[in-house]
Structure formats: C-alpha cells, structure tokens
Image: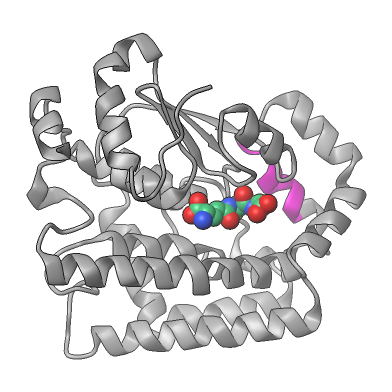
Amino acid sequence: MRPRASEAGGSRLAAAAGAGAAAAGPARLITIPFSHYCEKARWALERAGLPFREEGHPPLVHMVAARWAGGGRTVPVLVAEGEVFADSTLIVRYADRHLPAALRLVPEEAPLRAEAERLERRFDRDLGPHTRRWAYYHLLPRRELCERMLRHGVPAAERALMRSLFGPARWLMRRAMRIDPAAAARSWARIEEVFGEVQALLAGGRRYLLGERFTVADLAFAALASPVLLPAGYPVPLPALGQLPPAMREGIEQLRARPAGRFALQLYAQERARRLVPATTATRAGAAG
Ligand SMILES: N[C@@H](CCC(=O)N[C@@H](CS)C(=O)NCC(=O)O)C(=O)O
C-alpha cells in the first residue's frame, strides 16, 4: 500500500517520494465531481498548473473508491508521486510545494501563515458541512435536479446504479448527514455567522481576506460556500436559480447579495480560471525541505 501523508508529515513524505514521480504514473484525483471539498482541491491543483486525471464517483460509491485509492472514507483523495493525500488541506499543501514561495496559497511569513491556516480550518469545519447540509436539504426532494448533478463526470455503470438506487441512497445520505428541517435551520444560522465574519474581515476595503494576496483562506471560503451561492465558473454544471425550490432560491439570492457572497462570486470570476506555472523539480525539492 502507498504511504499515506499525514497533516504533520505530509510534505516530507511526499517530497521524499518525488523522485519516483514518473514511475508512479499521472496523478489521480478521486472525487464526487460536484462536491465542494473536491472543488477546493481541484482549484488548488489547477491553479498550480499540475496535471491530474479526475476520477469521479457518485456519493456513497465514493467511499469504496476513496478506500481503494488508499484514502479513508471521504473524498477528495489525491494519488501523486507515489503518495496518497486523503484530505483537501493536504492536497492544497501538495499543490503549493510545486509553486515558488510568492505564489503559494499558504504564505511563508509566520503571522500571515497562521491566519491563513486558521481561516482555512474555520471554513473546513464550520462552513463546508453546513453549506452542504443546507443545499442537500433543499435539493434531495428534487430527484431530477439531483440526478443531473450526479450524472456529471462519473462512469456510466455508477450512473445507472445511482438511478436505480436513488431512493435508498437518498435515505442513507439524509441519515449520514443528519439532514432534517431543524438541522438545516441550524446550518443556515452557522452559514450566516461565517458570512458575517468574512464581511468583518473585508471591511475597510480589503481585496482578499488577508489583504492584498490571494491565499488558501479565500480559496477555501469561495469553494466551501459554493453550494449556497452556485457561482458562475464552477467547473461542474449546477442547477440554475430558476430551477430551484423557491426557499432555496430565496436563500441563495440573500447570500449572493451580502458582501461575503459578492466576494466569493468575484473570486470565482477573477481567480478560478487562473493558471500558474509550476516550479521545476529542482526548485520544488529545495522548497519542500
Ligand atoms: N476534511 C475533508 C472533508 C471532505 C468531505 O467531507 N468530503 C465529503 C464529500 S463533500 C465526503 O467524502 N463525505 C462522505 C463522508 O463523510 O462519509 C477534506 O477536507 O477533504
């Protein structure tokens, strides 16, 4: 089995495995294509100009695929350079190691770095699970909308499986993520709280959450807020506002109009298509140590 990178030791392990990159074959990113945590990882890899092949699966099937790739039960999982990165945060760090310091998502300077990592953790823990639950709460009753999202980027056999098992799969998802009216209302309150914090950080005309530089805090906020904003530029087709149940549409319109919502949509418009040039192998080895 391939060595699994841990949060503490991931850089070192993957750097050590770097020499075998060619032998290990092209990088693979295991995803649920429309998942916002997968989007966080995919955005970082694409921005760094790193080639990879995305292997998409529907929810629930993803658990088998994630384990099969050497990860845990969640996606994204990146298999690259003979290593397994089983978390979006580790994948962002992996992407960063291939970039010159000035272009990395996690700044080198200690105070900025600490703040970028604090915000990333806050969004990972307190925004991502809530935007997902609130969006699923509204979307799961609408089978046709779900099926359109589930279809994108997954093998035909798994698509057919999802179609025939949609009812039981929906039941399992509601149970696993505790999706019910009271929980959705609590999630909405948490989303508003985080949007308020982002608004406060941006007050005074900051361009990005940490000032003048695009960092992992911005990327994580925009990606993890995507289920409640449905930004243009999201690389997987999402339902149009007009197709949504009215309560979901109203919620999204409210959030889009808030300063934090406008900020995330602007990040998608201005940053999502940006591609940098990865550093050479020599620079990369030096940067990782
Ligand atoms: N901390 C993980 C969270 C990833 C995550 O929650 N992924 C979801 C898809 S959106 C998942 O795999 N959920 C299935 C599960 O938790 O069993 C990361 O940042 O990669």
Q: Is residue 269 left or right of residue 97?
A: right
Residue at figure coordinates x 63%, y 27% from the top left? 68
**Residue 137 lies in quadrant:** bottom right
Across and down, in percent, residue 57 comes to: 66, 36
Residue at figure coordinates x 87%, y 47% from the top left? 166
Task: Compare residues 228 and 192 and report the one nearer the observer.
Answer: 192
Can residue 134 be seen by looking at this rendering?
yes
Residue at figure coordinates x 69%, y 85% from the top left? 185
236 relative to 222, above or below: above
Q: Please identify the quadrant where the C terminus is shown.
A: top left
146 relative to 56, above or below: below
In magenta stretch: residue 133 = no
Can residue 94 be seen by looking at this rendering?
no
Task: Compare residues 168 and 150 and report the one nearer the observer.
Answer: 168
The coloring applied to the image is: one colour
194 relative to 39, above or below: below
| Prevailing secondary structure of the magenta residues | helix
Q: Is residue 49 left or right of residue 71?
A: left
Across and down, in percent, residue 282 comes to: 9, 24
Q: Which residues are magenta?
A: 145-152
**Residue 97 lies in quadrant:** top left
Q: Is residue 5 left or right of residue 212?
A: right
Residue at figure coordinates x 48%, y 24% from the top left? 2
Across and down, in percent, residue 195 comes to: 43, 83
In magenta stretch: residue 146 = yes
Q: Is residue 245 left or right of residue 87?
A: right
269 relative to 3, above or below: below
Across and down, in percent, residue 76 comes to: 52, 43
Task: Compare residues 81 and 13 and report the one nearer the observer.
Answer: 13
